[in-house]
Every structure is written in structure tokens, then in C-alpha cells.
Amino acid sequence: MSNPLPTELHDLQELRDHPEIGGTVYKHYLAAAVDLVAGTAGGAATVAVGQPLDTIKVKMQSFPELYPSSVKCFQKTLSQDGVRGLYAGTIPALVANIAENSVLFCAYGVCQKVVQKLVRKPNVQELNPLDNASAGFLAAFFSSLTLCPTELVKCKLQSMRESTHLNGATSQAGM
């Protein structure tokens, strides 16, 4: 009985160069690489633009008694910590968003192919909006596994100054 798997380098090279097998595998790897790069760029852009607003939001949620409005929170953060204070927690946010978007983009392409096979469509372009939503749901599940741990670290870094200040005031009051 012969082994169906290639065992020699020559066999592997023939597989790679086979127009139907090797070309298809190469296209899948190329598509995944493009999705990963696009997700990385999207994640980095999201943090560059949105981090100051996210910092304000987290501070207001964590310490509503210190910040009655987003404008006051912005002004106080800027006056106490400068622009750097608005970008607190940027490194974990970058890691989180790059990981999340890269996984999301890559997983979405794979999940579209899975859904395409399940609904027996000839290609992913034939998927209807519900099929695409199903693929998006599955892809979001995988991306959430990368986001949740880093989001916790980011939020703690964004509210660290206020936590230290409040803990110091509590210990000075004898509590």
C-alpha cells in the first residue's frame, strides 16, 4: 500500500508547482497575509486616532465623581499630564487592536469560505448578507479572544493616575 502523503522533497516540489494544488495554496497564504497586513494597518490607525477619546471615556467611566463632563476630563488630563496623558495605555491598545483586527480580517476570509461550503455556494462572492453576517459573527468570536486580556491592561493604565490619587487620599483620611 502506498503512502498518499509526499515524503520526498521532489514530491513536495511537484505539489507546490501543480497548477491546481500549489497555486491554490499559494493564493490562500497570500490572501491571509494581505488580511493580516490590512488588519495591522487598521488597528494602528484606530489607536492613533481614537486613543485620546478612549482615554477620556475610560476615565469618566472609572471616576465619574472626578469628571462631570468629557470636556472637563479632557482639560484636566491635558493640564495635568499633557498630550502624553491622552495617550496613556497606547502600547497595550496597539497590541490589542493590531491583534484583534489582524485576527478578525484573517478569520473573516476563512469563515466566509467555511460558510460558503456550508451553504453550498460556488464562491464567496455568491454569499448573501445573512451568510456574510454569519461569517462575521464567527470571525468576531476569534478576534475577541485576542482583545479581552489586553483591553483590561489598557484600561488599568488609562486610569492609573486617578487610582493612585484616590488611594492616597483614602489612606491619608485614615481609611
Image: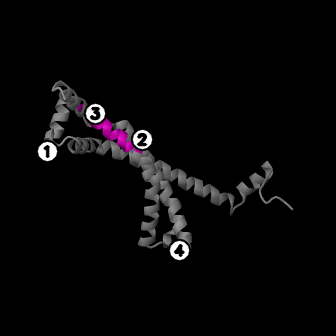
Mark sitting earlier along the chain (2/3): 2
Residue marked by disc 1:
69
What is the CA distance from the residue labelled 4 to the residue labelled 3? 49 Å
What is the CA distance from the residue labelled 2 to the residue labelled 1? 29 Å
Residue marked by disc 4:
119
> Between 93 and 83, which is closer to the camera in this rendering?
93
**At 30% from the left edge and 44% from the top edge, which residue is drawn?**
49
Secondary structure beneath dot 3 equals helix
Which disc is residue 160 wearing? 3
What is the CA distance from the residue labelled 1 to the residue labelled 4? 49 Å
Mark sitting earlier along the chain (4/2): 2
Amino acid type at mark 3: Met
Mark sitting earlier along the chain (1/3): 1
For the record, the magenta segment spans: 149-161
What is the CA distance from the residue labelled 1 to the residue labelled 3? 19 Å
Which disc is residue 97 wearing? none
